[in-house]
Image (tube, rainbow, N blue to C red):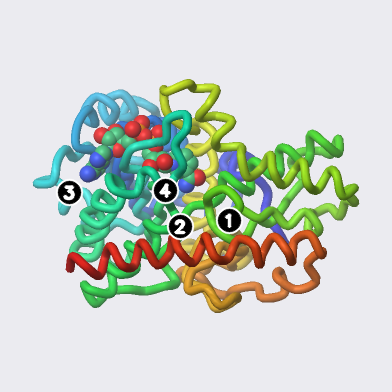
C-alpha cells in the first residue's frame, strides 16, 4: 500500500492516528543549511507539520531572520536559530530527524559530481556533529552528489562508532515526485493516484524510474518509455538551465524533502504503512548503496522490498546493468574521501 502525497497528509491535522489519539506535535527536526534555496521553503513546509514540536534551523549565515520570520506562523512548532560551528552542537541535541541541504548547487554545464570537492567536506563536518550530538536521529542527506555524500556520511558514522544503516537516507524523493508528475501528464492520469518507484542513484543515468511498476498499472510504448526515462533523468538539469546560473531545483526539492520528513515522522509515530524510495545501504544488488523502495518504521528502515527488483522490463534490466559502473565509482569516490582523512 503506497501512501498519498505529503500535501494530502499535511492537510488533515485533526485526523486520528492509528492508536486513536489525536496527532500531537512531539518530534524535533533540524535543518542544516536552513537559510539556502532549499532550506527556507523546506523549513516553511515542516513548520506546517502537526507532528513537529521543535524546528531547529542551522546555517553558517542569514538564519536568524529566517527563523524570526517563520516563528510568527501560528503552527505548533517552536523555531530556533543556530549560526556557525559553535552553535551546531546545541542545534542537534535531542533531534529525531536531521535534514542536510547544506552545500553549493549546480550551475549550467555542471554535473552533480562537479560539486564533490566542496560538498564532501561540508557533509563530513555536519555528520560528525550529528554523530556526537544525536546519533539516534534519522539522517536525510540532500547535498549532492548524493551518490557519494551518503557513503561519506556512512564512513563518518562508522569512524565515530554510531553507524546505523537503517537510519541513513539519501533523499531521492524528488525523482519520484518528478516521475509521478511526468507520467500523469503524459498518460492523462489523476496525479494524486500515480506512483512510480525510482531506483539506482541520484545522478544522470543512475536515476532509473521503473515505469513498468507504475501504480495504477499503465502501458507505455517503447518510445514513451525512452522519452519519459530520459526526461526524469534530466529533470534536474532542465531546472538548472531554466534558472540560468541562479541555482538548481529548490521549491520542488523542498516539497519532496518535506514529504520524506513527514513520512519519517509518521513512521516514528508508529504508522505501520509508510513506504518511500531512498538511496540507502542495500543488499538488493552487488552495490553497497542503492536507491529503492523501503518500508519505514520506528527504528528506521524496517524492510527492503526485493520483489521491486524482480520482473523488470527488458529496457529496465539493461538500464540497471548500465548504471552500475557509474554508481559504483561514485560510491567508491565517497568512501575513499572519508577514509583518507579520518
Ligand atoms: P543554496 O546555495 O541556495 O543553499 C545552501 C545553503 O547551505 C546556504 O544557505 C549556505 O550558507 C549553506 N551552507 C554552506 N556551507 C555550510 C556549512 N558548512 N554548514 C551549514 N550550512 C552551510 O543551495 P540549494 O539550492 O539550497 O542546494 C543545496 C544542495 O542541495 C546542493 O548541494 C544541491 O546540489 C542539492 N540538491 C539536491 C537535490 C536532491 O534531489 N537530492 C535536488 C536539488 C538540490
Q: Which is more N-terminal, label 1 or label 2?
A: 2
Q: How many marks?
A: 4
The reply to whether discs 4 and 3 touch (Cβ–Cβ < 8 Å) is: no
Residue 135 placement (x, y as % from top left): 27, 67
Marks 2 and 1 close (CB-CB < 8 Å): yes
Q: Quadrant of the N terminus?
A: bottom right
Mark 1 residue CB less than 8 A from any atom of ligand 1: no
Which quarter of the figure has residue 58? Answer: top left
Q: In front of the other: label 3 or label 2?
A: 2
Callout 1: SS: helix
> Which residue was labeled with disc 4?
113
Whether label 2 touches label 4, CB < 8 Å: no
Disc 2 secondary structure class: helix
Q: CA distance from mark 2 to mark 4?
A: 9 Å
Which of the numbered marks, if any, corresponds to residue 88? 3
Observer-nearest of 335 and 79: 335
Do residues under tags 4 and 1 come within 8 Å of each other at their CB atoms?
no
Percent of width and height locating residue 299: 44, 72
Mark nearer the N terminus (3 vs 2): 3
Position in image of residue 198 (x %, y %)? 65, 55
- For ligand 1, tell me if the residue under mark 4 lies within 8 Å: no
Q: Looking at the rendered structure, which numbered label has been put on residue 206?
A: 1
What's the residue at 35%, 58% (across, down)? Answer: 96
Q: Quadrant of the C terminus?
A: bottom left
Q: Which residue is mark 2?
A: 147
CA separation in Å, label 3 and label 2: 25 Å
Q: From mark 2 to mark 1, how far is it between C-alphas?
A: 9 Å
* Left or right: 22 in relation to 57: right
> Mark 3: few, some, or many residues within 10 Å (few <14, many ≥20)?
many
Q: Element under label 4?
A: helix
The image position of residue 207, as x and y in percent, is 60, 53
Amino acid at each position: 500500500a503506497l501512501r498519498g502525497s505529503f500535501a494530502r497528509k499535511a492537510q488533515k491535522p485533526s485526523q486520528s492516528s492509528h492508536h486513536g489519539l489525536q496527532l500531537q506535535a512531539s518530534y524535533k527536526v533540524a535543518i542544516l543549511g536552513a537559510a539556502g534555496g532549499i532550506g527556507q521553503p523546506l523549513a516553511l513546509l515542516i513548520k506546517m507539520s502537526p507532528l513537529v514540536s521543535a524546528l531547529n534551523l542551522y546555517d553558517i549565515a542569514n538564519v536568524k531572520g529566517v527563523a524570526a520570520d517563520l516563528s510568527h506562523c501560528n503552527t505548533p512548532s517552536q523555531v530556533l536559530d543556530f549560526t556557525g560551528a559553535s552553535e551546531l552542537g546545541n542545534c542537534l541535541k535531542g533531534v529525531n530527524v536531521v535534514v542536510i541541504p547544506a552545500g553549493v548547487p549546480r550551475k549550467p554545464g555542471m554535473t552533480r559530481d562537479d560539486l564533490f570537492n566542496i560538498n564532501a567536506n561540508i557533509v563530513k563536518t555536519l555528520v560528525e556533529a550529528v554523530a556526537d550530538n544525536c546519533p539516534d536521529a534519522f539522517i536525510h542527506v540532500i547535498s549532492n552528489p548524493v551518490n557519494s555524500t551518503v557513503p561519506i556520511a556512512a564512513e563518518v558514522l562508522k569512524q565515530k562508532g554510531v553507524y546505523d544503516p537503517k537510519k541513513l537516507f539519501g533523499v531521492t524523493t524528488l525523482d519520484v515526485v518528478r516521475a509521478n508528475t511526468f507520467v500523469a501528464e503524459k498518460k492523462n492520469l489523476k496525479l494524486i493516484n500515480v506512483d512510480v518507484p525510482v531506483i539506482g542513484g541520484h545522478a544522470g543515468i543512475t536515476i532509473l524510474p521503473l515505469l513498468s511498476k507504475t501504480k495504477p498499472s499503465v502501458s507505455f510504448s517503447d518510445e514513451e518509455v525512452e522519452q519519459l526515462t530520459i526526461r526524469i533523468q534530466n529533470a534536474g538539469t532542465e531546472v538548472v538551465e531554466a534558472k540560468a546560473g541562479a541555482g538548481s531545483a529548490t521549491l520542488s526539492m523542498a516539497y519532496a524533502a518535506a514529504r520524506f520528513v513527514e513520512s519519517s515522522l509518521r513512521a516514528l509515530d508508529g504508522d505501520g504503512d509508510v513506504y518511500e524510495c531512498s538511496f540507502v545501504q542495500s543488499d538488493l544488488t552487488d552495490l553497497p548503496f542503492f536507491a529503492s523502495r523501503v518500508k519505514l518504521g520506528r527504528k528506521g528502515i524496517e524492510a527492503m522490498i526485493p520483489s521491486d527488483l524482480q520482473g523488470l522490463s527488458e529496457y529496465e534490466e539493461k538500464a540497471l546493468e548500465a548504471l552500475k559502473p557509474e554508481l559504483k565509482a561514485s560510491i567508491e569516490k565517497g568512501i575513499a574521501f572519508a577514509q583518507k582523512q579520518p
